[in-house]
Image (cartoon, helix red, strand yellow):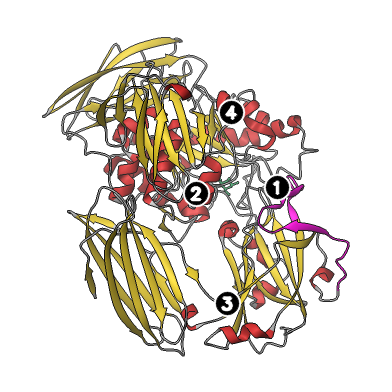
Amino acid sequence: MKYYLSLVFSITFLQIAAQSELSLSPRWKFSLGDDPLWAEYGYNDTDWMSIAVDRIWEQQGYESYDGFAWYRLRFILPSSIKNAGTLRDSLLIYLGKINNFDQTYLNGHLIGANGFEATDALREDMSFIKAPTNYWDRKRCYKLPLNSPLIRWDAENVLAVRVYDEGGQGGMYTGDQSLRLTCLSDYLLVDFGREAFVFKEKNLVKNVFLKNVSSAYTLFGKFDLQVSHKNTGKDALEKELMFFLKPGEEQRIEVILPQQDHSLIVKYDVEIQRENFKLKFIEETPYILTPPVPDAPRIVGPSITGVRPGRPFLYTIPVTGKRPMKYWVERLPEGLLLDPNTGIISGKVDKAGEYKVVFHAFNESGHHSREFIIRVGDQICLTPPMGWNSWNCWGLSVDEEKVKASADMFVQKGLRDHGWTYINIDDGWEIHRDKDPKRDAEGNILTNEKFPDMKRLGDYIHSLGLKFGIYSSPGPLTCGQYTGSYGFELNDAKSFGRWGVDYLKYDWCFYDGLAKDTSHAERKKPYVVMRQALDQLERDIVYSLCQYGMSKVWRWGAEVGGNLWRTTGDITDTWESLREIGFSQVENQPYAKPGHWNDPDMLVVGYVGWGPHLHPSHLTPDEQYTHISLWCLLSAPLLIGCDLQSLGVFTLNLLTNDEVLALDQDPLGYQARQALVEGDIQVWVKELADGSQAFGIFNLGESTSHFTLSFEKIGLKSNGHLRDLWRQLAIGTYENWREFTIPAHGVVLMKVD
Ligand code: GAL
């Protein structure tokens, strides 16, 4: 079946089922520790503490607690809710997301674990904590047949949730706990999220799937879509389609639409005959702002790099334009060698100093030259690192092939030409805690079967002019429950040195049990130990601390030798997560500077999923523009978190706008300040090395904003020139104020000089 619509539309997420449901209390009873009696119906929990289930326990007085804890809730289940559904077969219990693992009991009986039915394996006491660590992002829903003897109708019931968290944040945290009966629409899978729109010539194309997942019911109904312009709210189109699906059947709807220069809002209502409610989905269409690069060479990327004397140097001159390209460097310091066909500079410089060189690039369409500084001294990481990390896409399912493919994609898709450099393996390369041996007789860490030869992998990455990153944790185990570095820090640093590692992300997991208390000294300790080990190597290694911002790490991260430090918990691909993390980077602002960066976590654009199954980012296109703009204003490390093999035109476009990336790589290293908060509007201002300024106006609200910016009021120069960085377009001179139109959750990113 084909739909040819006259206007663009894309992505989906919001599913609202308008069914009668019973919301559960936002406050439950809570106890740290573990006792099988706490599952029991009759257990007396009146003395337990009360806890909110819409936020993690760390935010409620249990800072740094890892281990077991129980949540209990008593509630009356009225039999009247049975009348709400068209089907009378099952009861659904929604518990929201839980960080990290759960076993859930109703009236003393196990009904499920980690969002799965209670199978024998999950019944086994401890097996539930061996599941993939990304279960923190999984919505828990448990299903019971309506005639189950476990359910006590019109009487008190007890839900008891046993939670285990082994590191980082813990507990129930989304606050959307409820109960309801199944309906026919629970068997209709409306899958908009499997594919993102792809750009084909002047069109956008996407498949949407309707699947009947029941084995007994036939589903038929109406699929309705309404399209409107996001910025004006004006209607664009309306269409209706009937569907009929036998048990197990799937129907594909292909949508082909012409591209636009803004998002359209697409609303889908799916109505199943015989049921008096609709499934509602909303998505926004992608649109491209970055203009195509010219054929003639253009040297981009940072204007400076730092290396220590006598340490291996590797830098690929980032140049856009038509290939083949030839390179030449004027005044290259002694010890360095340029490959004139690839632009890769390697070698070592023994003498400290500031070497001012000139890069030249030539192709059949022209020539470009640009000054560049190689600073040989005691500081590296002079601009925020730009690269790829395996975590947000592959999670623990990462392997050598996937890492090599990412390096290849950096070259083939041209990311290297825009300055993208690091290829970083996150957790999952070490030996799992259930397997032995974990180290050799000398204490050297072993890799698992997915990484047969780290040195070979490092060499491969370097041969492409890219740099190689790895991950470890100071505890005996990593967050993914693989071998950590505790007690073997020097061995591990040496292994990293042998493998040619250029970047180390060092976590915190499983160190909680080792730290004596939560003092600054104890929080710093493991990072100092690893720093000292790294200092024994004849290699520069960018040192990235990953302890989620505990004890205001930005105040002491540089002191323990960190080049960057995570300032928050893990990011996910939702607006809530992006907003919470991105717009909270205020207090740490003065601490960012060349060599030392605040890290608000990795990028969540493109196909992500924490492995092995990926989905297009749940952020709308405007939210993705906000994400990249804000991270660049913040001088944040830019680590792409998506699968590069499925990188589409829209994502590539977001990641290769040289004027936007130049903000991030500006040598002044100034982290944008939050200059104005007015209702839903925030303006962030960044000072730049050449004396110009950049600013982003962000609209955190739910509708298009027409905002008048008064330049002087927030410390921006008045009477200058304005440049739209995403469109790479001069938009003329301005005086003291100007009105801007900013889409909901979107941004206007400008430079003034
Ligand atoms: C988390 C960290 C993630 C990822 C993961 C690996 O603590 O924040 O970014 O590295 O560990 O298990």
**CA distance separating discs 4 and 3:** 52 Å
Ligand 1 within 8 Å of disc 2? The answer is: yes
Residue 577: % across, % down: 53, 49
**CA distance separating discs 3 and 1:** 32 Å
SS for dot 1: helix
Residue 121: % across, % down: 65, 74
Of callouts 3 and 2, the N-terminal one:
3
**Main secondary structure along the magenta-highlighted residues:** loop
**Badge 3 density bin: few <14, some 14–19, many ≥20, Cα 10 Å:** some
Query: Which quarter of the figure has residue 220?
Result: bottom left
**Badge 2 density bin: few <14, some 14–19, many ≥20, Cα 10 Å:** many
Determine contact: label 1, label 2, CB under 8 Å.
Answer: no
In this view, 129 is above or below 581:
below
Please give the residue where the numbered disc 4 appears in the rendered image.
Answer: 562
Query: Which quarter of the figure has residue 92?
Result: bottom right
**CA distance separating discs 1 and 2:** 25 Å
Q: Which mark is residue 20?
A: 3
Q: Residue at x 46, y 84 (%)?
A: 275
**CA distance separating discs 3 and 2:** 38 Å
Query: What's under tag 1, amino acid-wise?
Result: Gln
**Residue 477 or 47: which is nearer the viewer?**
47
**Residue 274 or 392: which is nearer the viewer?**
274
Give the extent of the magenta segment. Answer: 43-67
SS for dot 4: loop
Please give the residue where the numbered disc 2 appears in the rendered image.
Answer: 391
Q: Residue at x 23, y 70 (%)?
A: 3
